[in-house]
Amino acid sequence: MVDKPLLELKHVTKIFRSGGPYGGKEFRAVDDVTFSMPSKPSILALVGESGSGKTTIANMILGFLKPNEGEILFRGESVTDWLKNKPKEFRRKVQAIFQDPYEIYNPFYRANRVLKLTVKKFKLASSDEEAEKLIHEALRAIDLRPQDVLGRYPHQLSGGERQRLMLARILLLKPELIVADEPVSMLDVSIRAIFLNYLEEFKKQYGISCLYITHDLNTAYYIADKAVVLNLGKVVETGPMENIIHKPLHPYTQMLIDSIPLPDPKMRWKEKLKLKKLSLKEIRPEKGCPFVIRCPYAMKKCEETKPSLIDIGDGHLVAYHLYER
Amino acid sequence: MNKSTILEVKNLKVYYKTVAGDAKVVDGVSLKVNEGEIFGIAGESGCGKSTLVEGIYRIIKPPGYIAGGKVLFRNIDLLKLKEDEMREIRWKKIAYIPQGAMSSLNPVLKVEEQVIDAILDHTDMSREKALEIAKEVLTDLGLPEEVLNMYPHELSGGMKQRVIIATAYALRPELIIADEPVTALDVVSLREVLQTLAELRDKYKVTIILVAHDMAVHAEVDDRMAIMYAGKVVEIGDVNKIFEDPLHPYTRGLIESIPSIKKKKIIKGIPGIAPSPLNWPPGCRFHPRCPHANEKCRTEIPELKEIEPGRFVACHIYG
């Protein structure tokens, strides 16, 4: 039997409307997005600037939002069906980590209760002793001392500890997929790496895949195997992480990579950023390539027709008119 | 050659009164900022870098208070000035861009109103003259005049932040203090904003104190920088030297913790958590997380010492 892909997005579009049901404005937050994650454990980076639709995609995968067009399949079955037929199983198999470790906890629950509820809800243990054992194991696996954290309230934990408590929760459930939306952007640098290393370890040791959503290409490069680059709701390039960073094809990806500040004063930006037009306003082109307004190489064709993804080998795909033959 | 000092902070202490005693958020910081340089202040959340610049600018609000020290701006102690004297310094001589300034733009007023307001608030000039000054400063920073007629929501994040910088520079201060000006910006906007700051230094010889937690930002534009940990400065030096050969174990840990697209390597981070300002560890405040800590580190506070010209470090390893 061939394993079904872990996650598949097929031509997914999400439209938000504003200004009333008739004649209101349409806003395509996510526009015809297609990508997939293989059945074998992997980390996929979903990269984009603010407004690129990355969080909307996460919300659709988790079933918080429904796509207007297209479908999202988890293990070959649509997320809508999963949630209708076996919601608990889906929630166990797909877990989320959010950006803000300060807001997700109930301030009146001690850490202990957060984890116990998880055990109870998903019936992970048959007795209290077993539950306690599981919780202690999970905490130790991510280097938290149970006696240090269990009795504490969320406000008594540091940002890093809170985010790690989420990891302990995930470890209790051993899901198949983690949807991590900017999980480290609020953490200090010195503990960021520690967190990322756990995601890597989860993949290797427990076979947990991760959709790592971020604006930060540095951390994406550090842990991901593959990347999907979004620009204004559309996929502009996707491929192995190594290729995306070292052989980027789309001018948008190139611009992103050129703009990353590097932690080395010897590698400062040499020249001024070249953009066709000053990015004065945030404009979404109605048609054509999403990058057309800022692209230094834009042609007439780019304004009119939207480029589709072209496979240039090695699993590297780019939506760029120059590569069409 | 000795560059002239524009700002000198001597043993500055900023404490916050709490029910559990004083939180010693900035606890004896000394540093010198040279004229015409970008001086970076780095450090992680809670290290006191924002409170330090708030102390320098004298905008600490109760329960916070300045518990001691001096802030010499061109040899005048800012902490000794009367409030109205300080007002003459603010914006005209030293401008301050607080963290998140760009999201505090009034959404229902056009940019023009807000830039002019800032100018009129600190001077007695006419509205027309203020508008002229606003246009001038935008042109100088390479921003189109059209932004004056726009509302904040029409501008991109980078553009908003550059408008803020232009407003801060409108009265041509000698020193600009920018607290986390590029946090929450996309990389492309980040680059635009940093280029604007570098331009202010290079073209207009403005001195800039740049507070940022992101070491890569410092690597990109700083001339010299200070690294803070737990309310104290642990290292000061030329930015190239600091990145090439960091002296303090914390600085080294920080630099080694940054993943980079240029080098793929395993990163360990710094184990442990930052201490609380209510209860700093005795001795060197970094010792519980330091791989080199010895008995002396646990008991004796290391002084910030110049161990080679221009390089200061507070660590017992260096004698």
Image (cartoon, rainbow, N blue to C red):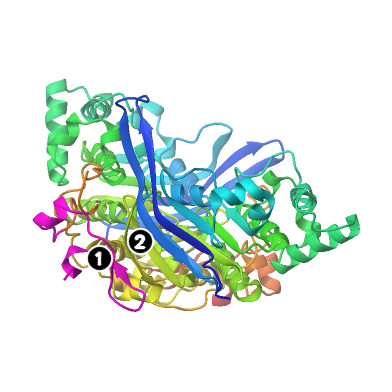
Q: Which mark is residue A229?
A: 2
Which kind of residue does numbered mark 1 sit on? His
The magenta-colored residue range is: A296-325
Judge left or right: residue A310 versus residue A219: left
Question: Is B20 positioned to the left or the right of A130 in the image?
Answer: left
Q: Secondary structure at mark 1?
A: loop
Callout 2: 10 Å neighbours few (<14), some, many (20+)?
A: many
Whether A303 is among the magenta residues is: yes
- Is residue B282 placed above or below B278 in the rendered structure? below
Residue A166 screen position, x and y as percent? 65, 55
Q: Is residue A308 magenta?
A: yes
Q: Identify the secondary structure beneath mark 2.
A: strand
Depth check: give the residue in front, B70 or B152.
Answer: B152
Is B124 on the left-hand or right-hand side of A313?
Answer: left
Q: Is residue B309 above or below residue A95?
A: below
Q: Quadrant of the C terminus of chain B?
A: bottom right
Pointer 2 chain: A
Where's residue B139, x and y in %?
12, 42
Q: Quadrant of residue A273?
A: bottom left
Between residue B174 and residue B250, name the one nearer to us: B250
Task: State the residue position of label 1.
Answer: A250
Q: Chain of mark 1?
A: A
